[in-house]
Amino acid sequence: MPLHSEATRDGVRVITFENPPINALGFALSAELVAAIDAAESDESVTAVVFAGSNGFFSGGADINDFLREPPADAKSIRDVIARIESGTKTYIAAIDGNALGGGFELALGCDYRVATARAKFGLPEIKLGLIPGAGGTQRLPRLIGAQPALEIMLKGDPIDAKRAQELGVIDDLVDGEVAQTAMRFARYPRKRISARQAQLGIKGLGLFAAPFAVAQAHKMVPPEDRGGFAAHKLVDAVEASLEFEFQRGLARESRLFDELVRSAPAHALMHVFFSERELGKIPGLEPSQPLEIETAAVIGGGTMGTGIAITFASAGIPVTVVEPKDEQIERSRQTVFGMYSYQVQRGRMTQEEAWKRGQSIAFERDLAAVKDADIVIEAVFENMDVKKEVFTKLDGIAKPGAILASNTSTLDIDAMAAQTKRPDKVIGTHFFAPANIMKLLEIVRGKTASPQTVTTAMALGKKLRKVSVLSGNAFGFIGNRMFFDYSREAIALAEEGVAPSYVDNVMRNFGMAMGPFATFDLSGIDVFWRIQQDRKDAVGRRTNIIDRLYQLGRYGQKTGAGIYKYEKGQRDPIPDPEVEKLFAEEAKAAGIAPRPVSDDEIVKRLVYALVNVGAELLRTGIALRASDEDIVYIYGYGFPPHTGGPMWYADQIGIANVYADINKFGWEASPLLVELAQSGGKLADYRPAAKELTHA
């Protein structure tokens, strides 16, 4: 049973949630809770009830699977549990150790008192699923701590620690030791319902006139409803109801808003993202493999990527050695490390002692011999195959026999690097995204010789590094960049047809992208695209010589102060440059491409469907395991709007037949998988490659 009720002692009954891994309060457990509360209310020997969680976890809230189906007519939810507490006569205390999130936090708010250990965390993360708290959180939390801090907690969706919760007045006591036992002393206290406070007058009745201002400002600060802010605006509306209405009316408003959101397209897309992340580790053929312990690491190259990777390891508590032969680059890398950790201290995200400890865990050496004891060695040198092959040959002779050798390449052949070693089974790709210590995405690239244990170790390491790790087969550009090259091709083609780069970028930002394609070019570096074109002429389109022209002019992007855009010294804000528009026009005229009017709808379709088409081909050929993996790559690595679910989910919602019809209209060669799904009415989300493991191209 997921609920354990102890015998009453000194008038107190302890009810413990035992529903691992997060003590989710689904329909079944909620029904048991209602019954347990009924039993306590009818027992005259009970004066108080303490709620606690098992295994160091209070509760992660509702079972998200419950949101995806209509509940049975007689189903009990967290709302029913809290309503029964509210109508009861006993004193209810939440004894919180570990996480109290979502409905778990709302249950605690429905109690009279909250007692927590120092390791407890509190949060209402529903906004990340396109929802709002639906069991009274938007009504009780503002009444408890005020509208502004309540809005901050709910709009960010991130948990706060016990110390902050105590400062805000969320908890009544912060304790050491066994929290349920300590909580029992509140049993003799009278009831203290949050909902009863200001029940008739709301917060305005207390004279907190700043609260309406906080609500108005919140509406201005969150994105528009059609650009990912749908749930955020509903959340602000719900909090406003806590200011304007008495409690029961505010609660009814919250329920209506929640029920509207749970059926909305953005919420279903964000729940798709949530479940897709949890699918990433399910890889055929790896189940029996146990990961190797990674206790020390080495990074070859002290440039921007190498330094970022080193910081990532240090921040995860793994000592790392950076091998860099140039003294001036070592000094720059040291300064980057120092600056990053100093910033974290200034922001209050870590103590000076923690920053010093992490900084000291990064060592700098000039000789490759320094990697001899590392459990994993990641090369982050210049993106050139000959250079990388030379590095792998040397590493193979120096690194200990059991060490994994990894490459941070963004496009190159992992198998070719593995062939330079006597341990091809221990070679793998680890494609970090810049800046490596900030971006969450990590592509794990499996070559044809990598062993299951090596893949398992890399995936486990990604989790330890707090990355979202996606497994890819070994193909040019892997998943993310291979899709991006087709996206880039269409962006360049649009500019060749007379659409200003700044206009294309603006349309895609309105669609929800974090950056437009041309701003992304400047961030990555035009010189990077130029080098790729030298090896792969068809990589980003070759109707004109625009990339060559920009490269010849030294317009590499942000790094040189000019690329597609101009940049003021020390600034990153792109400034449209008419000279670049002239370059596009000249190249288009020379290639015989006439300017034409292009609608915003066509811009979005050509760019997004380019991702979908090549994504389908990577799925068909087994480079990607699942369409949802590709969605995760694009959301976490390329700024695709999460509220659309990612490019592949988005295509499924549009309808593959409709996507295919537009691709034909654009004159592209469609992936055979899109043709098949368009004819059968199938979905990309349901497709799995016939092969059991990733393929290699």
Image (tube, rainbow, N blue to C red):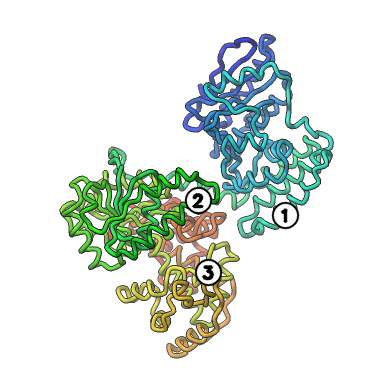
- The residue lying at 45 percent from left, 75 percent from top is 560
Disc sitting over residue 572 in the figure = 3
Residue 261, horizontal then vertical, whole percent = 65, 47
Circle nearer the N terminus (2, 1): 1
The answer, for residue 627, to whether it is visible in the render is: no
Residue 204, horizontal then vertical, whole percent = 82, 42
Residue 154 sits in quarter? top right
- The residue lying at 75 percent from left, 53 percent from top is 216
Disc sitting over residue 344 in the figure = 2
Q: On screen, 461 above or below 617?
A: above
Q: Nearer the viewer, mark 3 or mark 1?
A: 3
Residue closer to the observer: 626 or 97 = 97
- Distance between the alpha carbons at the discs numbered 3 and 1: 27 Å
Disc sitting over residue 217 in the figure = 1
Q: Nearer the viewer, mark 3 or mark 2?
A: 2
Mark 3 lies on a secondary structure that is: loop
Circle nearer the N terminus (3, 2): 2
Residue closer to the observer: 332 or 237 = 332
Residue 210, horizontal then vertical, whole percent = 78, 48
